[in-house]
Image (spheres, rainbow, N blue to C red):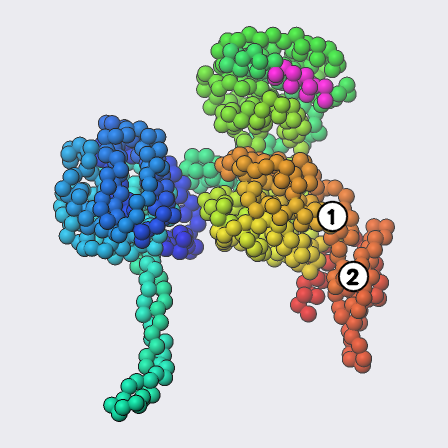
Amino acid sequence: PTVLVVLGIQEIHVDQEVINKISAAGQLMQCSASLDVLFLLDGSYSIGKGSFERSKHFAGKLCDALDIHADRVRVGMIQFSSTPHLEFPLNSYLTKQEVKERIKRTMFRGGSTDTGRALKYILRKGFPGGRNSSVPEILIIISDGKSQGSTAIPAVQVKERYITVFAVGVKFPRWEELHVLASEPPERHVLFAGDADDATNGLYSTLTGSVCSTTAPGCKVESHPCERRTLETVKELAGDYVCWKGSKQPSAVQASLCPFIRWKRVLIKHPSRCFRTVCPDPCDSQPCLNGGTCVSEGLDRYHCLCLVGYGGDFHCAAKLSLECSVDLLFLMDSSAGVTLEGFLRYKAFLKRFLQTVIGQDSPVNVGVAQYDDDVRIPIELGQHKDTFSLMKSTDALNFSGGRTLTGRALQYIAQYGFRSTPVFADMQDDLPRVVVLLTDSKSQDSVAEAPKYAKVQNLFLIGVGSSVMRTELTKVTGNPQQTVVYSDPQDLFNRIPELQRRICSVDSDEGCQAQSLDLTFAVDASSGIGLENFLHLRHFIKSSCLHFTINRDLAQIALVIYGSKAQTVFALDTHPSSSAVLQALEQVPFLGDSASAGSALLHIYGDVMTVQKGARPGVNKVVVLLTNGGGLEDAAAPAQQLRHNGILVFVVVIGDTQRDMLLRVAGSPNYLVHISSYEDLQYYQGIIIERICEEAKSPVNLCRPNPCMNQGVCILGPGSYRCECHSWEGPHCESRVLRGDSPRSPVLPQHSHVQWSPRGLQHFSSALQHTKRH
């Protein structure tokens, strides 16, 4: 089985699927019982300020799983070092937000580690602001377990008062002392703060049934073998060395052998059991059809990654095999929630779209509907056969200003929006039906059934709205890939090309499964990203790889991670299949030092996108740089060097960064995607894949990057190239010219023409592998 490693200190021996379920359950747990919870935070110098901040982060994350209220869970905090200090009693803050804000403001105090004294303080004072044992009392000690005094007697006395004690290790904890502090059995009451979701799951799993309400249906508490480690300094005999000792005789010394002792730090292992709640995964039922891959998004959500030719609905139903000939109905929000200003903005957007996309000979039939309390269809589908009259009718649309009943409007359109009438007698009945919802106001009725209405009537729903509407639009469409969001009013008009692609995606193949491409992901694995966000990036790469057919003839994928230095995780020609790439991605390490994107791009230029490392002549090459914007200062020059060599640099940045710097690296706004948060990364995957695929279809220069090795010069011919070699020979200057009478193998002439074709890629790759071995 694979192993979950949390900073090398705690390991749970389960497979990756169970690890994901443990983490997902930990994020969704809630305890709503009447409960007094007191945090006892170690603020000593042995912890240090950095680990103290991690302890606060863990306490804040744990509060997310508590229903904090005056009548339910109350939370207080004591910080201890040489002496205990009450940060806030249990009756001070009675909402989750207030408690979390107060925890954030807690300052590190420093001092020696006197855990016993802190426990005696609790024995003397009780739970400050608590309810005097009328409700269960939970004490959560967050410490490294390195007390400078005895803790055994006060720990027993605390537990004799029926206080449930959890001991949570931080930094490099001394597990023996944490076991002494924790309630019985220690396997259920000792946790590690390095993984907040896992620790929350462990604590909740212990409280479930006895204190907190039971888990969600289908969830259960399971026992898993685990191992915890303590970093200790030990004494070791390294050997003997000659030393000089005194003698009884005056002015004399005596040679002797003295032991040489050295100190070293070792990890002491503590085998144990870990109890965790595991909930069923939404992908367990295999909801994706036609070979689609289910990607879980927590305990109750998922999305399907569909093969070419599928994706007609959320579950990868077959697509319509038509060109972009559709029946297109715009459904405009005309309620008071969208305001007159918003309605006029959407009307202007619709007019611009009709002007730029719908031409005189367009095969698209267009209609427009409006809704508030009621639904009206002022422009029936196919009513206008020319753009001018369609524009004129659109201009005449008026704002109404009622309630926002989006769910009702979608149900009405699904039933009546595409009715066949004598007016439409000459229309084709088998055209794909697309509804584009334009709204900036949250619905006052439920939209949960909207995907069902669309599926029953065979409609393709697309949602357009501002970024605050993303969640509701995703619920309406049933698929984040069918939402178009904008950041500001002007950005709405920039989304016209994206909306056009979304409309035509109803009956066109997505992805570039049949395209040849050499693709390298360069991933920031520095401390500025952080482990949690790095895992987001790794998940994004895994799901992106499923959009490509990975083999020697089509897509080759390489991965480079970087901190202050870059390293190749796997090269273009390392893994010949999707399964091999996905398996390798599971092992990608987090580096955690400073970031230098420039060193990563230089590394790709000289040691990844080269013929020697598996890059193929005649194949488009793309580098996707995933970064938070840190360490880009030295990246512009190597990015330009890559572009000059025929390699596209695509920059995906998450967070706030100066746009000028990003543009210098990307070279063009077309190759830059700026995303506000790591959680939103999934929503941009479709756009990023589309742009990569567009590049894969563009013409290619056979001499860029240079396929000739050893300083050979590439010379283009009609549909071919040749390598001009110096002191080397072979089609790509791969064999050294032997001098003298040494035996030599037969080789091709020094000037060898190489005819390029996609079928030749596999031959080229295997020939290159042979060259490397020899």
What separation in Å lies between label 2 and label 1 (alpha carbons)?
A: 18 Å
Report crowding for label 1: few under 14, some 14 to 19, many 20 or more residues within 10 A (C-alpha): few
65 horizontally vs 685: left or right: left
Closer-to-camera residue (770/626): 626
437 horizontally vs 90: left or right: right
Q: Up-down: is 758 above or below 774?
A: above
Residue 351 sits inside the magenta stretch? yes
Report crowding for label 2: few under 14, some 14 to 19, many 20 or more residues within 10 A (C-alpha): many
Q: Name the residue: 32% across, 67% down.
A: 234
| Residue that mark 2 sits on | 712
Q: Name the residue: 37% across, 82% down.
A: 241
The amino acid at mark 1 is His
Residue 188 in view of the camera = no
Q: Position of residue 212 (x, y in %)?
A: 26, 36
Q: Position of residue 89 (x, y in %)?
A: 23, 34
Of the two numbered discs 2 and 1 in the rendering, the one whose residue sits closer to the viewer: 1
Precedes in sequence: disc 2 or disc 1: 1
Residue 326 in view of the camera = yes
Closer-to-camera residue (668/268): 668
| Residue that mark 1 sits on | 644
48 horizontally vs 336: left or right: left
Closer-to-camera residue (317/238): 238
Q: Position of residue 681 (x, y in %)?
A: 54, 37
The magenta span reads 345-356
| Type of secondary structure dominating the magenta stretch | helix
The amino acid at mark 2 is Gly
Q: Name the residue: 57% across, 38% down.
A: 657
